[in-house]
Image (cartoon, rainbow, N blue to C red):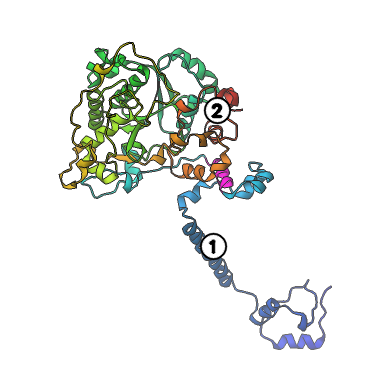
Amino acid sequence: MALTSSSKEGQHEKDMPSSPPITPTRSLRSPTTNSLAEKMVQKAGHPSTAFLYGVVAGTSMLSLILLALYLCSTGHGWEELKMQKLLWWDAWYLGRISEQDVAELPIGCLDFHLNSFARGERHISADDNERSVTNSTVRPTVADQEAHASSNIIFLHFNTKLSTFRYLCSVESAARMNTKHSISIHAENVMDFETKLQGWRSAVGPKIAGRVNVKPLEYDAYFADTPLEKWWKSGSYNNSYWVGQNLGNAYRLAAVYKEGGTYLDMDIISLNSLGAAGRYVAREQIDVINNAALSFPKGDALLWAIMEEFVAGWNGYLWANNGPYAVTRTFQKKCQKSVYHLGLVPTQPPTPKNKTTQHLRRQSSPSYLPQPTPTRSMNHLLPRARKPAFGLSHADYTDPSILHDHPYCADMNVLRPSRFYPIHYSRRSNLTNDWTLSCGKLQAMKRESLGLHWWHKMVADDELLHRESLLGRVMRTQCPGVVDAYGLRALGIE
């Protein structure tokens, strides 16, 4: 209803100073029914532009303060916030999170569900508790680590046939998480491997498939002019229960030494980018460095020392002696100050006291390993009893002042177990359990793990995984190309 003005009101308007006109469509209301806001507007007039800007700025500042308090209280950082690319309501609207998921899953599981769609590269660098002792006081930045990192990722497949498509998940995830890296697969049977790769190459397209190259294993070429050459030519590698496994232990060292780059076992699924981790090895547990993941530049002197230790301590009848324990022994002998600093001090003798052929990690060999019966005594092949080298005994570290590091130990990262072995082999059942039972672990893996070692020896090729198992969930998330090309059944997922 339009407002009418009496002559008295008209005279009153003439006597008042200029003020904003009354909105024509506004209805008459009794002064007693005016709201507080209306009274304030009547008293102060319409708010100025500066006042409105002030309100907006104040609200924004309050939001930033509340956001900072949230990040401090939850332990998340700005990088973590940037990774959350999909908002809750957006994910629900697009159908990526169902109403049933929102109603039934714990908060941690929903957070992982959202984060699994964030495909950007996340760069993880070593912290102070993972760095060797060095004379440099300048902490390397992520850019420094990436500048010195090789853009080559090496896989090794020493079986005559590709026994499981699960290995392709490791290849695809490495390519997806490291968009600037080339992937080299050294295979025993190149033709069989390439045949199995054809469907996958079509599924992922040239941007990923074009960076994956399969090449033949060349023992003579890679062992030549290294400490492994004499060991190889003498045929000593045949004195072993696990010939292929130990050849693989040696070959990875030679390949990284001659090419430079990062070696990964084929049962490691990449979860984040490797570029910022620098020059590294990774612990499997507090006092053991595993050799399933390692990264060195071409011609690295420490890698040469590891090959020397491999030959000097060779024993083909002790499981892990020529793999994880060869790397661990090298550090304990050559990088004593760093071993003390990092807590890698040995807790047990490096070889069993009774010299029997037993698994060093357990009192007896696990059932999943072959158990051949020797036709004659193997005692002549076991190392002679001798005093362990300095650095291999816990007693050697009682006086830190006498410890020393070789120059090649500087600027070396010894990554903590969660980087590649977030699920220890003794808890491998977590891999096959429902993923919703380990949401906290999955969130931690996405935040700080470079890869997930899933212990192929302990998850058989013919063992079916439930699609909602932890390992099944990670495979479906990290290697969609393999799923598209061959289906879940090819991955052993039902």
Question: Is residue 72 at all visible to an observer of this figure?
Answer: yes
Question: Is residue 487 at all visible to an observer of this figure?
Answer: no
Quadrant location of residue 279? top left
Image coordinates of residue 3 in percent, x first then y, are 81, 77
Quadrant location of residue 130? top left
Which residue has dot 1 on it? 63
Image coordinates of residue 211 in percent, x first then y, are 44, 26
Residue 331 located left or right of residue 363:
left
Nearest the viewer among 74 and 327 is: 327
SS for tag 2?
A: helix
Which residue has dot 2 on it? 481
Q: Amino acid at mark 1?
A: Ser
SS for tag 1?
A: helix
Q: Residue at x 50, y 46 (%)?
A: 83
111 falls in the magenta region: yes
Nearest the viewer among 41 and 35 is: 35
Q: Are marks 2 and 1 in contact (CB under 8 Å)?
A: no
Q: Amino acid at mark 2?
A: Gly
Residue 187 located left or right of residue 376:
right
Q: Which residues are magenta?
A: 108-118
Image coordinates of residue 71 in percent, x first then y, are 48, 57
